[in-house]
Image (spheres, rainbow, N blue to C red):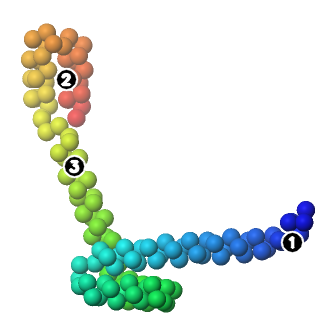
Amino acid sequence: MVAATSYPLLEVFWTMLIFFGFVVWLWILFAVIADIFRRKDIGGWGKVAWIVLVILLPYFGVFVYLIAEHQGMTERAVSRQEAAQSEFADYVKSAAPQENPAEQIAKAKTLLDAGTINQADFDRIKEKALAA
């Protein structure tokens, strides 16, 4: 009971709020550092200057970067997302079967005639090809 009286509920909430704020600030810090290293529009010395500012004056440096580069950060994030979506779409297109239904049915008929599959398998393949 001594611990409960020496650490009141409001102080618990205050500690949780401070901890949450620190975690959010760390998240923003890592996002800013990642954006600095991913930038292609500035050279190495510009990146070094931003990193030194963010490390030497952490809160001030992060807030200055967010104010100065908020539009650029958004554009770079959107372009990375569009590139990832494009790569995913290309992968899906490459992984999906490229045959038309007539070719799939013809191959299934060849397998049926060869005795590799039975009539039920042929009917299932034919339904699936016509449904797509």
Left or right: residue 94 compared with residue 18: left
**Residue 72 coordinates in the image, percent (x, y):** 32, 81
Assign a secondary structure to mark 1: helix
Assign a secondary structure to mark 3: helix
User: Rounded to the nearest whole Å, what is the CA distance between mark 3 and mark 2?
Assistant: 26 Å
For marks 3 and 1, the one nearer the N-term is 1
**Residue 115 coordinates in the image, percent (x, y):** 13, 9
**Residue linked to disc 3:** 91
Choose between 87 and 38: the one closer to the eye.
38
Q: Quadrant of residue 120?
A: top left
Q: Amino acid at mark 2?
A: Lys
Tell me which residue sits at (76%, 70%) in the image: 12
Choose between 108 and 62: the one closer to the eye.
62
Disc 3 vs disc 1: which is toward the camera?
1
Disc 1 vs disc 2: which is toward the camera?
1
**Residue linked to disc 1:** 6
**Residue linked to disc 2:** 126
From where the camera sits, is residue 96 visible?
A: yes
Asked if marks 3 and 1 touch (Cβ < 8 Å), the reply is no
